[in-house]
């Protein structure tokens, strides 16, 4: 059960290949009505019915929040991932009926900011597509620095340059172009908020440098959906439901709990929102924490786990679920 | 020490050295001691990137204690009003990474925070420590006049003369506590006035 996310019955209205790795999907409501309003940075969880298996993957909405006739997402194909992106690329076609959650925003703009400084890496550009559209419509002050591997993989770089001109700065890995991060972070006017979305390494780098350079934590916003990592299978006892279940190699703990007919709350399924936080009653083994929600202290305590992305290796694990 | 009562009543912490290279301290009177106490836990070279703006109390003490910290800049001012243009200028030219530390009386902390908010700094990003007097800046809700250094309960509005109940209800935007007429029904009713904000 996803807290606060009623489902939306949609139809795929268009599928547009963007480049070698990225395809864009458009959804409209099946009843022809407008979709719920959202704000830049919001995501939806897309349900993928793949035979017996249901995948639930979060994707940022990248369309303008001013246009709710359709939702658009861009999916980067991950050939070695758990299969969600491959399903989208291989099986989703215009006219197909699908179900998506209501939008949820865990990466919203702080509209009190005097200026919005955005840093994107790769497919991390998607939430900024919506945020820049929102800000541009309000005359907001923003600047986007976008790192991509090559010009041809710079998804939407051309669109952004055309829309916003010099507010967009591009960096190409193959041309050895790098963001001069310290200089960038040291020259921003007071009241600037920083937003970063991209690979975990980039987010950690930016957060570290910002903290060292005196940026208060409340001015630094980031979003990283950690895809659940595969791992060794393990057994879990759900004490409240009195069930013992097995988590397969390719399955997340949350998915295994759901497959057993237990519905824990969730929102992001990526280790950031905190909804599925679960108490550990007892454990004998080692936790593999992959979330951005719990503190380091909580990780060490062995008393809590985020079942959407974290795993366990050892003899026994009993959860309050 | 200011105690928590209602949610808008500001509470203050203890100054702690923040990461970064640029640090702006604004203090009055005994607030200087909060800076001196914090200096003990500051990393080497911390004050090389620091500016201290100080308004001495009527006793004129603590100037030497601050100068001994060898900040990059030390500026002394006779009143908050007299340092305001300089403070506005400093903040207008500042960049992200500047950390703000306010120490001393509630009036000083509140007014400096008000200027900082106007410059785009979030109040949660500001280090504060209360030292010294609990005298309040009060705004009369009736005539909107501000009365400085209110120490009594109730207090007389310096502008319209109404007798006001000094509430814990505080506005960061105007840097003042709210004063509301205490005897609006019967003006002949004069409750005893006690000195409570020393």
Image (cartoon, coloured by chain):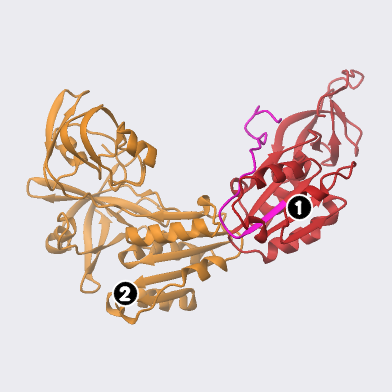
Quadrant including the C terminus of chain B: top right
- Visible residue check, residue A115: yes
The relative height of residue A131 versus residue A273 in the rendered view (above or below) is below
Q: What element carries label 1?
A: loop
Residue B23 part of the magenta segment: yes
Label 1 crowd (10 A; few <14 / some 14-19 / many >=20): few
Q: Are marks 2 and 1 in contact (CB under 8 Å)?
A: no
Residue A219 part of the magenta segment: no
In the image, the chain rendered in orange is A
Q: Nearer the viewer, residue B69 or A32?
A: B69
Rendered hue of chain B is red
Residue designated by label 1: B68
Alpha carbons under labels 2 and 1: distance apart: 54 Å
The relative height of residue A167 versus residue B196 in the rendered view (above or below) is below
Which residues, given as a range, are shown in magenta? Answer: B1-25
Q: Nearer the viewer, residue B102 or A245?
A: B102
Say which residue appears at 63% left-offset and 38% top-offset.
Answer: B13
Q: Which chain carries label 2?
A: A
Residue A154: which disc? Answer: 2
Question: Residue A152: horizontal and vertical position, in percent?
Answer: 27, 79
- Does residue B140 appear left or right of residue A58 in this picture? right
């Amino acid at each position: 059960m996803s807290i606060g996310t009623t489902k939306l019955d949609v139809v795929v209205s268009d599928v547009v290949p963007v480049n070698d790795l990225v395809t864009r999907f458009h959804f409209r409501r099946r009843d022809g009505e407008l979709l719920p309003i959202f704000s830049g940075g919001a995501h939806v969880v897309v349900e993928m019915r793949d035979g017996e298996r249901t995948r639930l993957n979060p994707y940022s909405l990248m369309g303008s929040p001013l246009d709710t006739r359709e939702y658009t997402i861009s999916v980067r194909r991950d050939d070695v991932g758990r299969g969600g992106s491959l399903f989208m690329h291989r099986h989703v076609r215009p006219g197909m009926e699908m179900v998506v959650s209501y939008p949820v925003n865990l990466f919203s703009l702080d509209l009190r900011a005097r200026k919005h400084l955005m840093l994107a890496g790769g497919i991390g550009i998607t939430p900024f597509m919506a945020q820049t559209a929102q800000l541009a419509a309000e005359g907001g002050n923003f600047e986007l620095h976008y790192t991509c591997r090559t010009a041809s993989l710079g998804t939407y770089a051309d669109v952004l340059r055309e829309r916003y001109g010099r507010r967009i700065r591009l960096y190409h890995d193959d041309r050895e172009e790098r963001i001069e991060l310290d200089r960038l972070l040291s020259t921003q006017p007071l009241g600037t908020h920083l937003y970063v979305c991209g690979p975990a390494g980039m987010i950690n780098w930016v957060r570290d440098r910002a903290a060292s350079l005196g940026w208060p934590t409340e001015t630094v916003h980031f979003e990283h959906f950690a895809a659940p990592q595969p791992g060794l299978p393990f057994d879990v006892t759900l004490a409240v439901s009195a069930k013992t279940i097995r988590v397969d190699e390719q399955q997340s703990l949350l998915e295994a709990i759901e497959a057993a007919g237990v519905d824990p709350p969730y929102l992001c399924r990526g280790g950031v929102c905190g909804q599925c936080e679960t108490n550990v009653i007892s454990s004998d083994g080692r936790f593999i924490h992959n979330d951005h929600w719990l503190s380091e202290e909580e990780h060490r305590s062995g008393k809590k786990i985020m079942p959407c992305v974290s795993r366990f290796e050892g003899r026994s694990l009993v959860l309050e679920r | 020490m200011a105690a928590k009562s209602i949610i808008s009543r500001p509470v203050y912490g203890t100054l702690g050295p923040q990461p970064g290279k640029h640090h702006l301290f604004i203090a009055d009177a005994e607030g200087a001691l909060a800076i001196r106490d914090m200096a003990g836990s500051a990393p080497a070279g911390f004050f090389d990137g620091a500016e201290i703006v100080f308004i001495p109390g009527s006793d004129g003490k603590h100037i030497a204690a601050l100068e001994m910290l060898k900040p990059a800049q030390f500026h002394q001012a006779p009143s908050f009003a007299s340092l305001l243009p300089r403070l506005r200028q400093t903040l207008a030219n500042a960049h992200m990474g500047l950390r703000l530390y306010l120490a001393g009386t509630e009036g000083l902390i509140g007014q400096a925070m008000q200027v900082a908010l106007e410059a785009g700094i979030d109040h949660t990003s500001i280090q504060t420590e209360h030292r010294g007097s609990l005298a309040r800046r009060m705004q009369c809700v009736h005539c909107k006049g501000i009365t400085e250094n209110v120490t009594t309960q109730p207090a007389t509005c310096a502008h319209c003369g109404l007798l006001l109940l000094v509430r814990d209800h505080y506005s960061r935007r105007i840097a003042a506590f709210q004063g509301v007429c205490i005897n609006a029904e019967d003006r002949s009713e004069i409750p005893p006035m006690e000195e409570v904000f020393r």
